[in-house]
Amino acid sequence: MAEETTKTATDCPACSTEHAQGDQCAPSEPAQKHSIPVIAQVHVQEEVRPIATRWMRIGRETDNDVVVRDDGFVSRYHAWITFERDHFWIEDLGSTNGTMLNGQILERRELLASGDKIKIGESEMTFVLLEKTGSGS
């Protein structure tokens, strides 16, 4: 008799609906990209990118929010930063070379704190929180 595998349901960071663990909305679904107040940004080299929606996708493809050019170690859709339950998270999207947070390879999505260093391929970014998040606002 075959062993049955059970997936645990979790909230998707893109749409906040419940999906089986490991499943999520396609990162290219713009209908799920609701606006939020700009309370954080990502510093990529000389550029400052405000985070103004519930998720910011990073990768090589031109339809990403942060396009990383000239880095052969970056996947087409590499990682995303999401805003969920008053917190920012980072998650690797199954990239070939992985995503690092403060020098550690991401094994699962992780909470972001102001000043966190994100490395995607050879490209380094800094997450900056402009305002404190929380339900007291």
Image (spheres, rainbow, N blue to C red):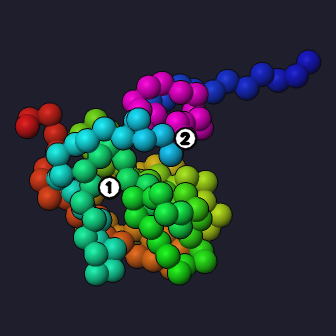
Give x and y (percent) for residue 104: 48, 67
How crowded pointer 2 is (Cα within 10 Å; few <14, some 14-19, many 20+) is rated as few
Q: Earlier in the sequence, mark 1 or mark 2?
A: 2
Q: Is residue 56 magenta?
A: no
Q: Is residue 83 visible?
A: no
Q: Which residue is drawn at the image coordinates 53% and 63% (left, top)?
A: 61
Give x and y (percent) for residue 40: 21, 57
Q: Which residue is drawn at the image coordinates 40% and 76% (left, top)?
A: 124
Q: Quadrant of residue 126?
A: bottom left
Q: Is residue 31 visible?
A: yes
How crowded pointer 1 is (Cα within 10 Å; few <14, some 14-19, many 20+) is rated as many
Residue annotated with mark 2: 26
* Secondary structure under the numbered disc 1 in the rendered image: loop
Residue annotated with mark 1: 112
Placement of 54 over or under 96, stated as above or below: above
Q: Which residue is drawn at the image coordinates 34% and 74% (left, top)?
A: 44
Give x and y (percent) for residue 95: 60, 60
116 or 34, which is in the foreground? 34
Q: Overall secondary structure of the magenta stretch?
A: loop
Placement of 56 over or under 84, stated as above or below: below
Quadrant in which the C terminus appears = top left
Q: Which residue is drawn at the image coordinates 18% and 52% (left, top)?
A: 38
Residue most extreme to the left: 137
- The answer to whether 2 appears left or right of 27 in the picture is right
